[in-house]
Image: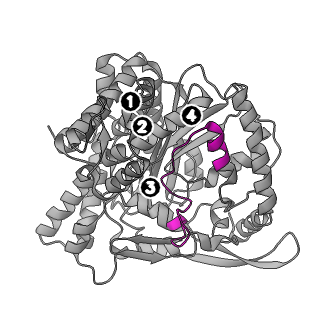
């Protein structure tokens, strides 16, 4: 899309009255509350869904690659923040043996098609937490911060300058974030050990990719208890999934040594990227955060409706069911929490209340990704049904677990309460209890013990070996440094090995194949 046309679309977004938008969102919330009371958002059983994000690289050297828009349409993927991103969303399925198998088959089928098509273009889609090799002939800092200004006439006739990020997708919402009156309330920077980058747009967020399991609760009124359990498992599941200890080498501060960078690297920098790009460091908790417990479903609805409005998008009339609350639905797009409730549905029969679980980075293989979906769904089933005592773990400790996992992965000091009420910080006790309940939840939904064990094997193997993708990356960089490589060469070699191993195992193997028995 030409920059002038995109700037005009951004101008239309900026012309929306933020106060009126918020008022309408609050009014929409009452529509949803009424629907909850009437059972509109209930389901006869739990439903699962999945979002899967990737980035593209050039086949010959693993350099980041922009994906032509025509190619995204051809493979049935959606655009995400950066021009190098692609996203797939699965069709929701009942949580049972056939439903989980359908989720895995759909991901594999669509990924196979995407890989075949992109291979013909000398590109490859990569499932990874954070890219580290910039496009050929470019540096990461410039790629992430490059922008242009265009003058546009606003709907009221005034002239205004609009900033457009050069390498960002042509979504007016993304670009509007850098041009709103509240733009200064977003950090628009990277702030991590030995990394500091200032930007004029939210483009640095395009460093990261994730997988997002969804769980539709059977009874909308019960959403808070599912949500509170999801907060308790966020830290442990993140610890199992960490996959982004390194940045592109040119983003590291001058003067920082390879040893310092290796020593201080967090296992999941994706968390800090999302938070520092979108949060004002001087404004309290920030929009991207680990959320507090819920007491009622009405509280969940109100939190979304009254959340700070960054981009009040224009709303068009439609005949979908959720067009009865269009402003509220729009607010979901900028309601950034690591665990978040969602209320929507294209039709009345499809209306649902669900939990989106957002802490997990993209994983090395499809099987690893589905393992997290199965574990999350199984835990939602089992912990709530058995009234597991971990829900009594202090919220502050659950939050500390989350950020400890971000920093140290499986080596983090995590607290847990086991099924017999015992408080523990022993890693094996924690994950034995956690994964046993995930398996119980799956078998309770009709999976055989062998089927449940198969889904959870990749995670159990990580616990047994003390290995995560993030640790694998750090070990590879350590090996390269010990053999005399500089940091840039070590990270590039590691990243290419990651892509090569993924090419061998992505559709039929798992990360367990990378680390052996």
Q: Secondary structure at mark 2?
A: helix
**The magenta stretch spans residue 288:** yes
Q: Nearer the viewer, residue 466 or 70?
A: 466
Considering every residue shown, the one lying at the far right of the view is 157
Marks 4 and 1: in contact by CB < 8 Å? no
Q: What main secondary structure does the magenta stretch of the protein show? A: loop
In what quadrant of the picture does the N terminus appear? bottom right
Q: Classify 15 as above or below 354.
A: below
Q: Which mark lies nearer to you, 3 or 1?
A: 1
Residue corresponding to mark 2:
391
Residue corresponding to mark 4:
223
Mark 2 and mark 4 lie on one chain; the one further toward the N terminus is: 4
Mark 3 and mark 1 lie on one chain; the one further toward the N terminus is: 3
In what quadrant of the picture does the C terminus appear? top left
Q: CA distance from mark 3 to mark 1?
A: 41 Å
Q: Report the span colored magenta.
A: 277-303
Instruction: Left or right? Give the position of 120 relative to 297.
Output: left
Marks 4 and 2: in contact by CB < 8 Å? no
**The magenta stretch spans residue 132:** no
Residue corresponding to mark 1:
388
Mark 2 and mark 3 lie on one chain; the one further toward the N terminus is: 3
10 Å crowding of disc 3: few (<14), some (14-19), many (20+) = many
Q: Which mark lies nearer to you, 1 or 4?
A: 1
10 Å crowding of disc 2: few (<14), some (14-19), many (20+) = many
Instruction: Left or right? Give the position of 468 relative to 190.
Output: left
Q: Residue, x 51% and y 39% (percent of image)?
A: 227
Q: CA distance from mark 2 to mark 3?
A: 40 Å
């Amino acid at each position: 899309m030409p920059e002038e046309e995109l700037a005009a679309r951004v101008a239309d977004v900026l012309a929306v009255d933020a106060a009126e938008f918020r008022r309408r969102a609050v009014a929409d919330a009452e529509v949803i509350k009424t629907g909850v009371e009437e059972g509109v958002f209930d389901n006869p059983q739990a439903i699962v869904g999945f979002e899967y994000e990737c980035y593209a690289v050039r086949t010959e050297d693993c350099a980041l690659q922009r994906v032509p828009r025509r190619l995204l349409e051809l493979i049935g993927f959606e655009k995400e923040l950066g021009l190098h991103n692609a996203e797939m969303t699965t069709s929701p399925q009942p949580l049972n043996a056939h439903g989980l198998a359908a989720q895995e088959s759909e991901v594999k089928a669509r990924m196979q098609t995407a890989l075949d098509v992109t291979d013909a273009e000398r590109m490859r889609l990569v499932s990874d937490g954070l890219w580290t090799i910039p496009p050929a002939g470019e540096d990461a800092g410039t790629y992430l911060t490059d922008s242009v200004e265009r003058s546009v006439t606003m709907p009221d006739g005034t002239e205004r300058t609009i900033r457009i990020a050069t390498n960002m997708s042509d979504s007016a919402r993304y670009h509007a974030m850098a041009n709103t009156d509240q733009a200064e309330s977003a950090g628009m920077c990277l702030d991590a050990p030995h990394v500091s980058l200032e930007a004029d747009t939210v483009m640095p967020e395009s460093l990261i990719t994730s997988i997002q399991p969804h769980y539709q609760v059977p009874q909308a009124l019960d959403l808070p208890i599912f949500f509170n359990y999801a907060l308790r498992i966020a830290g442990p599941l993140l610890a199992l999934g960490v996959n982004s200890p390194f940045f592109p080498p040119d983003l590291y501060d001058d003067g920082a040594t390879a040893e310092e960078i290796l020593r201080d690297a967090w296992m999941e920098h994706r968390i800090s990227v999302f938070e520092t790009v979108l949060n004002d460091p001087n404004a309290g908790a920030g929009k991207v955060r680990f959320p507090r417990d819920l007491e009622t479903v009405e509280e969940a609805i109100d939190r979304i409706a009254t959340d700070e409005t960054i981009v009040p998008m224009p709303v068009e009339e439609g005949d979908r069911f959720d067009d009865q609350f269009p402003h509220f639905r729009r607010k979901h797009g900028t309601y950034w929490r690591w665990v978040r409730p969602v209320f929507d549905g294209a039709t009345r029969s499809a209306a649902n209340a669900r939990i989106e679980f957002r802490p997990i980075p993209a994983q090395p293989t499809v099987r690893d990704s589905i393992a997290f979906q199965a574990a999350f769904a199984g835990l939602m089933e089992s912990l709530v049904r058995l009234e597991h005592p971990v829900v009594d773990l202090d919220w502050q400790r659950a939050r500390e677990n989350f950020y400890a996992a971000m920093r140290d992965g499986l080596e983090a000091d995590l607290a847990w309460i086991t099924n017999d009420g015992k408080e523990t910080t022993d890693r094996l006790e924690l994950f034995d209890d956690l994964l046993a309940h995930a398996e119980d939840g799956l078998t309770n939904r009709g999976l055989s013990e062998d089927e449940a064990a198969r889904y959870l094997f990749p995670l159990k193997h990580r616990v047994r070996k003390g290995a995560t993708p993030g640790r694998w990356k750090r070990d590879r960089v350590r090996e390269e440094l010990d053999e005399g490589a500089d940091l840039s060469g070590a990270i590039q070699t590691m990243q290419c090995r990651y892509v090569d191993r993924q090419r061998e195992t992505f559709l039929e193997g798992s990360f367990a194949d990378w680390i052996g028995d």
